[in-house]
Image (tube, helix red, strand yellow):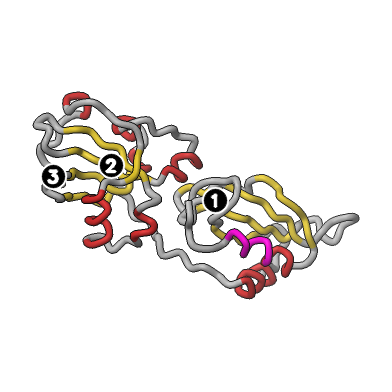
Amino acid sequence: MLWGKKPAKEEGKLSGPKEIPGPVQNYLVAERKMDPDLVKLLKAVECKSATGATFNIRVFDNSEAIAKNVQVKDYTSLDECPDLILYEGWFDEGAKQAELEEKKKVNWDTPIFTQAEIQQKIEALREPGSTVFFYMARGIKSGGPLGMGAAVVELNPNYPGKKQKKYIVYTANVTDMQPVGKGDKAFEVDKPKDIARWVKEAHHKRMY
């Protein structure tokens, strides 16, 4: 538990989202065992303490905020969206010290599938209307552990109707690790190999 915390409005000027400060990055890597490349992709909002010696800080994933249609402007923006806060605590830039409490558990160890594994999962769909999804690291959507939403593959319930393809592919935002519905339709195709190739191009280690 964090003691002695004062309301943000009493602690000084608020700043907008920015890269996580060095002492906090070091803390997350050393104490929370987070991937240093991932830590650099997350954002922080902070508020100077009354003494000026330390800062209160909140760490969040901006891609998740975008997926939830939330604009994080400063530290207090997250008062109304506590589910976006990954870590919260304080840091001292001069002393190179930090202490944070985990507020939301996220599984960052997302498996990255090979193209063959993606194809196998698509081919395993049996019931009309059943779906499988894959997190994406590139694209036009947001959220999820890879930052750019998910591709959702559906076994077309109308197949083999007239002019119907076997699979329908959608792209969707991801919140709390799950696609928001099926998302927007991208294309239809009969061959799972074509889908697997397309998914794999954007299914890799997070970059943004």
Q: Nearer the viewer, mark 3 or mark 2?
A: 3
Label 1 CA crowd tier, 10 Å (few <14, some 14–19, many 20+)? many
Q: Residue at x 63, y 50 (%)?
A: 171
Is 43 left, or right, of 157 in this rendering?
A: left
Residue 149 highlighted magenta (yes or no):
no
Mark 3 or mark 2: which comes first in sequence? 2
Q: Position of residue 196 (x, y in %)?
A: 67, 66
Q: CA distance from mark 2 to mark 1?
A: 23 Å
- Where does label 3 land, which residue? 94
Q: Amino acid at mark 1?
A: Gly
Q: Position of residue 17 (x, y in %)?
A: 35, 37
- Where does label 1 land, which residue? 149
Q: Amino acid at mark 3?
A: Gly
Is 184 left, or right, of 53 in this rendering?
A: right
Q: Closest to the observer: 93 or 77?
A: 93
Determine which quarter of the picture holds residue 131. bottom right
The residues colored magenta run 197-202
Q: CA distance from mark 1 to mark 3?
A: 38 Å
Q: Residue at x 27, y 28 (%)?
A: 14
Q: Amino acid at mark 2?
A: Arg
Instruction: Name above or below for residue 47 compared with residue 159.
Output: above
Label 3: which secondary element: loop
Q: CA distance from mark 3 to mark 2?
A: 19 Å
Instruction: Name above or below for residue 195 compared with residue 52.
Output: below
Tell me whether circle 1 and circle 3 mark residues in contact (CB < 8 Å): no
Mark 1 or mark 3: which comes first in sequence? 3
> Of the numbered discs in the image, which one, if any, rests on residue 58?
2
Q: Nearer the viewer, mark 1 or mark 3?
A: 3
